[in-house]
Image: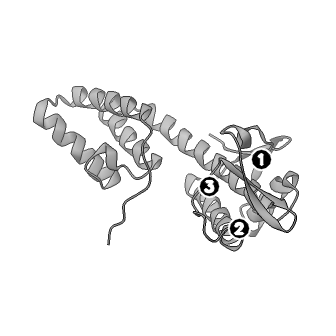
Amino acid sequence: MKTQSSFKLPTPHYKKFFAQMHKATVALGLLGDAANDYYRNVLRECAGVSSIKELPSLDAYNECLRRFAIDAGDFAQPLDYLTEKMKRYAYIIKVTTHQIMQLARLDERTARNYFDSIMRQSRRDNCVVTSGETFYLDIPPGDLLLFVKILDTHLRRLKKRHFPLFPLSFNDRVRYVFEGSVFMLEDVDKYYYSRLPFSALKSC
């Protein structure tokens, strides 16, 4: 049975989507019904949906934009979309690693060391340190996604143990604080994790 995604594309993304689609339809010489058919075909082929309102994720959105850019002959744009995806993976790695430290009651300053141990266990300990907590992962996008999945699996286990009634989905607007003998959820602003040390950025 098909389940409906809880993802909702942010409203500002609509403008960019249709602007890129317009460039593609102009380049392909599509008008009217042909342009509408193209819109539906791209959504179906890139995301398995029939409307922009049904897009299941930002990755699906970016796949559509990449297709529009290629059809418009703008071959530099797909690289930009790939870079944005890598930045997103790197941010998820950062947040997830810090939240694991919080729920494991470990010093968050050891987040980088913890991630290094995951790299070694996966036999991909080829990160290039640039300065301090910032480093570059010279690995393919699929491998970077592998680390996202490994960390997410561990974090979900900890969430189930301490917050069995709460959603297990990624949430960068909270931190976990141990008070007395229980964990508490503390709301944080959208820049909280961005300001913390430790950055795993995919190299070009």
Q: State the CA–CA distance, disc 2 to disc 3.
A: 11 Å
Please state which amino acid type lies under the numbered disc 1: Val
| Relative horizontal placement of residue 61, taking residue 91 as reference (left or right) | left
Q: Which mark is residue 188?
A: none
Q: Which mark is residue 128?
A: 1
Please state which amino acid type lies under the numbered disc 3: Leu
Residue 123 screen position, x and y as percent? 73, 66
> According to the image, label 2 marks what residue?
122
Q: Earlier in the sequence, mark 2 or mark 3?
A: 2
Residue in the image at 75% along x and 64% along y: 118
Residue 6 screen position, x and y as percent? 44, 55
- Secondary structure beneath dot 3 equals helix
> According to the image, label 3 marks what residue?
144
Residue 104 screen position, x and y as percent? 81, 66
Residue in the image at 65% along x and 72% along y: 160
Residue 200 screen position, x and y as percent? 71, 47
Q: Is mark 2 in CB contact (under 8 Å) with mark 3?
A: no
Task: Give the foreground label among 3 and 1.
Answer: 3
- Secondary structure beneath dot 2 equals loop
Q: Residues within 10 Å of mark 3 (few under 14, many from 20)?
A: some
- Secondary structure beneath dot 1 equals strand
Please state which amino acid type lies under the numbered disc 2: Ser
Q: Residues within 10 Å of mark 1 (few under 14, many from 20)?
A: few
